[in-house]
Image: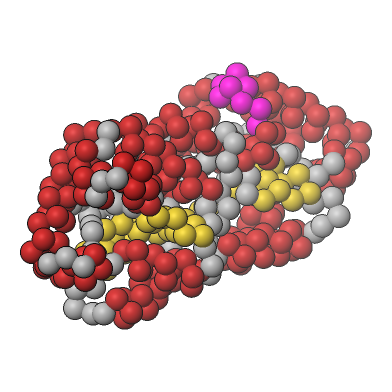
Amino acid sequence: MKTYLKFLYSHEKKLGKKLRKRGLTITVSGLAGSGKTTGAKAIAKALKLKYYEIGAIQKSLARKRKISLEQQVKTRANKIDYMMDRKSLELAMRGGCVIVARLAGWVAGRWADAKILYVAPINVRAKRVARKEGISINEAKKRIRSRDIDDRKKYKKIYGIDLQDKSIYDIIIDNSKISLEEGKKIVVRSTKDFLKKKKIVIAISGSPGTGSTTIAKELAKKLRLKYFSPGKIFKSYVREKEAEAALKVWKTRGKSKRFHLGLDDQQRKIAEKGNCVICGKLSIFVLRDLADYKIWINAPLPIRARRVMKRDKLSFKNAKKLLMERELIERKEWKRIYGIDYTKQKNSADLSINTFNLNPKQVVEKILKFINSKKL
């Protein structure tokens, strides 16, 4: 799971079956008067993302109840928090947005491409709130101190987290000594710089004979990323040609669940370090919560058979037979081990490419174009 809040695990799993992330997700958090709203709007405008203020729900409820925002916040039921956090998670998983909320970073977790925290001393925040709401500085300080304490206690009680924990954030902005206008420029620049330096993980999967290995190696070379193939390890236990080697391993140690889980563990360890292209038949599934880009490669069976025929120096008939036999055993065994149809990974991929009339270089160019369209 990518969210940092355990109560959202089941909701994330449910959403994951129907949502595909499209574009960046940026979260902006901070206490009242910290400048988070101003900063978030600036980021949304600069990066051409949608803007969502989760706190607007509280304001709407306060208006309906005809009470102050402070009273609404103080007397709200836990179900209000749960509702807002579920909404935040859904937005984070959809992508293409900036989400503003005190817990936005905690809720989005690793779904967020950048988690930003605004901080400022209470005296500075009180002056801003007083000016905005037309109240005295002392009254503003009293209100925000009360809310700070109440929220910290509430989140500790219902989620087990400390609102003062800054360790989850990628960028921390202290705008207490600068104007909000200057702060907008700083947060936009900091966010862009962070995203450019962020380590990426690309998972590539596909049917046998699609050219996924060649494509993944070339992509890794172009992006200067580490390349890893669990399939290379899988087939290293025998000396036969590639298509025959895969079948032989499947008929021996390939039936062991422990063997496959070991390969999965190696993939995940490499992915956690970042800056890599991992190409494996199940990489989209295994790295579903770690990969920034998930690519599915496919091609019609006759095309794939011709490629295997040329690569392994087989007859077309034998190449086609080996591919069909391999696909049958892979679907059967992975269904037994993981409970999935590995060909359905296409449905959770960010990009699916049919290589029937494309060479590896052209496919790599398509992938690079897609990746660049999702970056700044």
Is 153 left, or right, of 242 in this rendering?
A: left
Counting from the top left corner in percent of width and height, residue 53 is at: 40, 55
Relative horizontal placement of residue 232, taking residue 366 as reference (left or right): left
Q: Nearer the viewer, residue 74 or 302?
A: 74
Residue 375 position within the rendered picture, expressed as x and y whole percent measured from the top left? 55, 65
Question: Vertically, is 89 above or below 260?
Answer: below
| Residue at the spot 83% in from the left edge and 47% down from the top edge | 307
Against 280, residue 343 (above or below) is: above
Q: Which of the 4 image quadrants contains residue 328?
A: top right
Q: Is residue 335 magenta?
A: yes
Q: Residue at x 37, y 78 (%)?
A: 185
Majority secondary structure of the magenta segment?
helix
One can see residue 354 in this view: yes
Locate residue 32, reporting x and y percent.
Answer: 23, 59
Which range is magenta? 334-342
Farthest residue toward the front? 66
